[in-house]
Amino acid sequence: MKPRNDLSDKGRAVEEWLDLRFFRPIGIRIARALYSTGISPDQVTLWSLLVGLVAGHLFVYQDRWIDVIGFVLFIVSDVFDSADGQLARLRGTSTRFGRALDGINDNLRFVNLYFHLMYRLMHGGVWWAGVLLVALAGLAHTYQSAAVDFIRNAFLDLGTGKAGELDLPEDLEAGSAGTVLERFGARVYRDYVVRQSQLFPRSVKLLRLLRAGGAGGRSVPPAFREEYRERQEVLLPLCSWLGQNIRFLLLGAAAVAGHISAFLWAEAVPMSLLLVVLLLMHEWNATALSDALEHERNAYARFT
C-alpha cells in the first residue's frame, strides 16, 4: 500500500511559514522513505530527542561556533520531530501515546537546554539572577506552548471540521494500562490537557456546550464554524510568534550575537506579554460564541 500524499501537514491554516516551506517538505521525504520499513514513529521521536539533547549540551560552552553547531543540531532534531508525526499520519497510526511522547520529547529537549543555560550563566558569574531568569523563561515556555497548541487544535476542530488533536480532561482515563512508559506518557499528557483547560476555561465551556447539544465536534452547524473562523483565525498568525520555530530562531540569533541571555529575556517578557493578549482575545471570542449558543441557539441550528 502506498502512503497517502494528503497527510503531510496538520492543516495550512495552523501551519507556520517555516514548517510549510522547510520542516514539512524534508520531514515528509524522511517519512516516505521510512514508510515501508519497520521503524516506528516513536523511534523517530527518540532520534529527535537524542539529537536535541546533544544540541542543548553544546550551549553550555561559551563559544560562538559551538553554539552555532548546537543550533544546527536543533534544526536537525526538529526535522525528525516533523517526520515522526507525518509518518504516523501516513500509516494511519496516530495515537494519544504518540502525541504524549512527542510532547515529552519537546519538553525534555528544552528542559535539557535550560539546565545547560543555567549552568552557563552561573559559571559566568550571574548566579541567582541566572537561575531566576532561566526559571521564568522555562515557565513561560510551558504555558506559551500549551496555549498555542490549544488554539490551533481548537481551530481545526471547530473552525474547519478537520480532525485535530484536541482533548478535554474528561476524554482521558484517570488510570491507564500498558507499559511503564505508556502510563508515564498518559499521566504527562493528562496533566498537559488539564493545564490547557485551566488556561482556556471559557473555550472549554464552549466545547462542552457543543458536546452537550449533540454536535460532538464533527457536526457543528456550518454557520457556527463560519463565525468561529472569523473570530479566531486572526489569532493564528500571532501564534507563530510563540511557536517553536521562532524560539529556535531567537536561540540561534542570540548564539551568533554572543548574548545567550537575550533569548531567555525574550521568552520571559515580550513573548509572555503576547501570550496574555492571545488568552484574552481567544477567551473573549469564546464567551461571545458561548452566549450565542446558550441564548440564541436558533441563530445556528436547533440542538436536539
Image: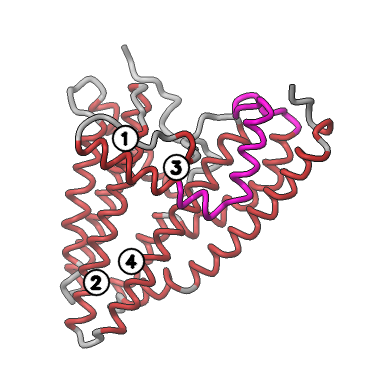
Q: Nearer the viewer, residue 3 or 40?
A: 40
Mark 1, residues whose alpha carbon is within 10 Å: few (<14), some, or many (≥20)? many
Q: Amino acid at mark 3?
A: Leu
Which contiguous range is marked in magenta?
194-223
128 lies above or below 94: below
Residue 170 painted magenta: no
Callout 4: SS: helix
Q: CA distance from mark 2 to mark 1?
A: 29 Å
Q: Amino acid at mark 4?
A: Leu
241 lies above or below 225: below
Q: Nearer the viewer, residue 111 or 7?
A: 111
Mark 3, residues whose alpha carbon is within 10 Å: few (<14), some, or many (≥20)? some
Q: Earlier in the sequence, mark 1 or mark 3?
A: 3
Q: CA distance from mark 1 to mark 4?
A: 27 Å
Q: Residue at x 63, y 50 (%)?
A: 202
What colouring style does the render use? secondary structure
Assess whether mark 4 and mark 1 are in contact (beta carbons under 8 angstroms): no
Assess whether mark 3 and mark 2 are in contact (beta carbons under 8 angstroms): no
To which residue does mark 2 refer?
Answer: 117
Q: Residue at x 20, y 32 (%)?
A: 179
168 lies above or below 197: above
Assess whether mark 4 and mark 3 are in contact (beta carbons under 8 angstroms): no
Assess whether mark 1 and mark 2 are in contact (beta carbons under 8 angstroms): no
Q: CA distance from mark 3 to mark 4?
A: 21 Å
Callout 3: SS: helix
To which residue does mark 4 refer?
Answer: 251
Question: In the visual, does 270 lie left or right of 229?
Answer: left
Callout 2: SS: helix
Q: Earlier in the sequence, mark 2 or mark 1?
A: 1
**Image quarter of residue 249:** bottom left
Q: Nearer the viewer, residue 93 or 295?
A: 295
Question: In the visual, does 146 lie left or right of 185?
Answer: right
